[in-house]
């Protein structure tokens, strides 16, 4: 079997998803026999930007240079995967969207003029065609391993668009909203994490982002009303939406 | 059907439970309440049944209160399908040489104990859909040799079994039924020759006139409290007429965010999606997981979508229960347990929906 050539690239992000990818490769070392890593600066010293079977992107674009790099990678790759919530939906740095970036920079950097960033935060799919997107902050390592396996042996994952609640119920976890009155974004959030927070008695804060197929402004409003009754303020709800679902919030239909 | 009634105490319920294992050599399975959580599983003793807690239910709210002997438990979110038709099952394993191995369910011989009339009815509905069609359900279901039902003398605020004719009492499909009256007396009746034999061996006495009267009164009250929907024929006619009323279905699904909690907790929802997990050595396994029709991907097919809009999916859920199951299996698909009301995080209430539909046709 010919080895699949793989490149892993990082835009603006925390490297948490790349860590998950590395853990997945350590857990399934047999995968390394089936892939040839061409570009992965966190893993190896010598990297080559060349034609790829699979490009994996972590992080979102926050400056023009990112957009150029992304377009170049897209042109070189057969399959492009956006890995994690930053790449797929914008990520936590989107909290600053709507504020002048020069204002924001001043709070963090002593010499803000050295930081090259635009005010927007763009998900990968806003710039190039994405073949497969994986959400999560960070992504689910088992899902990553499963997808790499499928791609190298020849296959494609079954896409399921459902709420976190479906995973919670299948796992037999008692609903934190219904039994404890804890605010939980689960009903409008995409499944995939295995209901991690609710399994520890916590509400979901939406790190997989909201569902993208059946949630419009009206439904977000209904959810917001329900969450407010449970004690989550509108401001906090909006921050969670911005921080983990930005590219979807931008395109929400009324 | 007139049943011969017997009276005893909660201790006799415990004795009945141990007789099933000691006498009939059955594994006794029921909804266990251990460490403050509910699961279906083998019952070691009557102590594991939720006999001294009461569930206080309302739309989007479920509280348990400890009330001792006067507590009357109805249900939690796990319905019988968690046991007979689990949320995730491996159905097929293919080894690297393309050898197939079908997964098998082997529960041994079991007795279901303390299930409620709504759940008993849901088993009849699932039988109609899955028996001799789904090998895993068929084998799990065939392992059920004895059914002991607890009739509901005090239904909850979300229960409407009386409206759909599934409860709060039982008249068929069980071996033994018992009802705990408020004065501590437990009324037993048998629904089969096995049940009659068990009660004979249990040595409970024939119920006295006073107990029979109290039982009749309690069950009458319980039935009345659960008759909250419009008359069923009129309701199904209204549902037929409402199908193209988009405005109405948008209105009743306004709060719905398609989270599919209703599908998951509904004792008669049976839909699944298949997933293949490939291994690098060439082997693979096929998994089956519950998938709700409220979820977007449920109606997604090559080339399009059966029900792309959310109101269509909510409408399908309701229509399937009340119009399509009767055509599929000759039984109504809604058992009136009210789980979908309680466990909906947005508080969508099927009773309100059905009244809205009923009123829309005047």
Image (tube, coloured by chain):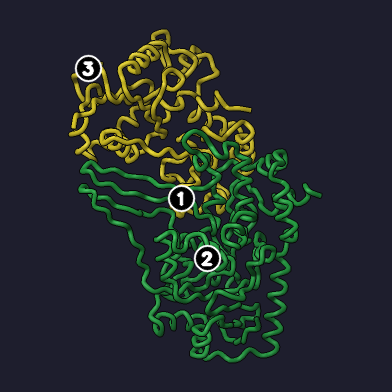
The chain containing the residue under callout 3 comes to A
Secondary structure, mark 2, is helix
Which chain is rendered green in the image? Answer: B
Q: Which of the two residues, B151 or A41, is positioned nearer the viewer here?
A: B151
User: Label 2: few (<14), some or many (≥20) within 10 Å?
Assistant: many
**Residue ID for mark 3:** A48
Q: Are marks 2 and 1 in contact (CB under 8 Å)?
A: no
User: Would you say residue A205 is visible in this rendering?
Assistant: no
Q: Is residue A215 above or below residue A102?
A: below
Question: Which residue occupies the extreme right position in the image?
Answer: B362
**Residue ID for mark 2:** B123
The chain containing the residue under callout 2 comes to B
Which chain is rendered yellow in the image? Answer: A
Looking at the rendered structure, which numbered label has been put on residue B272? 1
* Spatial separation of the CA atoms under disc 1 and disc 3: 44 Å
Question: Which residue occupies the extreme front position in the image?
Answer: B327
Question: In the image, what residue occupies the spot 56% across and 33% down?
Answer: A236
**Which callout, 2 or 1, points at the residue further toward the start of the chain?**
2
């Amino acid at each position: 079997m010919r080895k699949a050539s793989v490149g892993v690239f990082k835009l603006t992000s925390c490297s948490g998803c790349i860590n998950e990818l590395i853990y997945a490769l350590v857990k399934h070392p047999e995968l390394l026999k089936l892939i040839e890593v061409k570009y992965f600066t966190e893993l190896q010293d010598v990297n080559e930007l060349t034609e790829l079977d699979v490009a994996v992107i972590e992080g979102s674009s926050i400056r023009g240079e990112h957009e150029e790099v992304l377009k170049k990678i897209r042109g070189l790759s057969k399959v492009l995967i956006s890995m994690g919530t930053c790449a797929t939906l914008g990520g936590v740095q989107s909290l600053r969207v709507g504020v002048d970036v020069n204002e924001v920079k001043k709070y963090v950097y002593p010499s803000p003029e050295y930081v090259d960033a635009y005010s927007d935060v763009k998900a990968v799919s806003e710039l190039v065609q994405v073949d497969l997107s994986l959400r999560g902050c960070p992504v689910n390592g088992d899902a990553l391993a499963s997808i790499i396996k499928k791609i190298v042996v020849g296959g494609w994952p079954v896409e399921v668009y459902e709420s976190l609640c479906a995973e919670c119920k299948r796992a037999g976890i008692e609903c934190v909203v219904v039994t404890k009155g804890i605010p939980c974004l689960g009903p409008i959030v995409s499944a995939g994490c295995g209901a991690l927070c609710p399994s520890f008695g916590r509400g979901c804060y939406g790190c997989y982002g909201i569902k993208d197929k059946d949630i419009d402004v009206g439904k977000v409003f209904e959810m917001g009303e329900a969450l407010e009754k449970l004690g989550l303020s509108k401001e906090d709800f909006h921050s969670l939406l911005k921080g983990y679902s930005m590219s979807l919030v931008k395109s929400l239909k009324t | 059907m007139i049943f011969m009634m017997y009276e005893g105490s909660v201790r006799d319920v415990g004795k009945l439970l141990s007789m099933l294992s000691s006498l009939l050599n059955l594994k006794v399975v029921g909804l266990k309440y251990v460490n403050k959580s509910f699961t279906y599983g083998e019952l070691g003793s009557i102590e594991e049944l939720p006999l001294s807690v009461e569930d206080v239910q309302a739309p989007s709210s479920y509280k348990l209160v400890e009330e001792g002997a006067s507590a009357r438990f109805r249900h939690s979110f796990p319905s019988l399908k968690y046991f007979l038709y689990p949320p995730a099952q491996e159905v097929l394993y293919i080894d690297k040489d393309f050898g197939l191995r079908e997964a098998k369910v082997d529960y041994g011989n079991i007795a279901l104990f303390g299930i409620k009339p709504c759940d008993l009815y849901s088993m009849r509905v699932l039988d109609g859909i899955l028996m001799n069609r789904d090998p895993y359900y068929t084998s799990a279901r065939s392992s059920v040799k004895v059914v002991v039902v607890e009739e509901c003398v005090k239904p909850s605020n979300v229960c409407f079994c009386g409206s759909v004719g599934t409860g709060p009492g039982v008249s068929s499909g069980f071996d033994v039924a018992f009802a705990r009256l408020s004065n501590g007396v437990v009324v037993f009746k048998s629904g089969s020759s096995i049940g009659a034999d068990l009660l004979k061996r249990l040595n409970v006495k024939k119920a006295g006139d006073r107990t029979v009267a109290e039982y009749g009164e309690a069950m009458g009250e319980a039935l009345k409290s659960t008759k909250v929907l419009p008359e069923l024929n009129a309701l199904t006619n209204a549902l037929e007429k409402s199908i193209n009323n988009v405005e109405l279905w948008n209105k009743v699904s306004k709060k719905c965010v398609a989270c599919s909690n209703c599908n998951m907790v509904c004792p008669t929802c049976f839909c699944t999606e298949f997933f293949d997990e490939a291994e690098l050595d060439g082997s693979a396994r096929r998994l089956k997981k519950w998938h709700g029709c409220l979820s977007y991907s449920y109606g997604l097919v090559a080339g399009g979508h059966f029900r792309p809009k959310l109101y269509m999916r909510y409408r399908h859920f309701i229509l399937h229960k009340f119009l399509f199951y009767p055509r599929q299996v000759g039984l109504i698909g809604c058992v009136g347990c009210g789980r979908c009301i309680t466990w909906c995080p947005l508080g969508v209430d099927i009773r309100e929906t059905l009244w809205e539909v009923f009123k829309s046709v005047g």
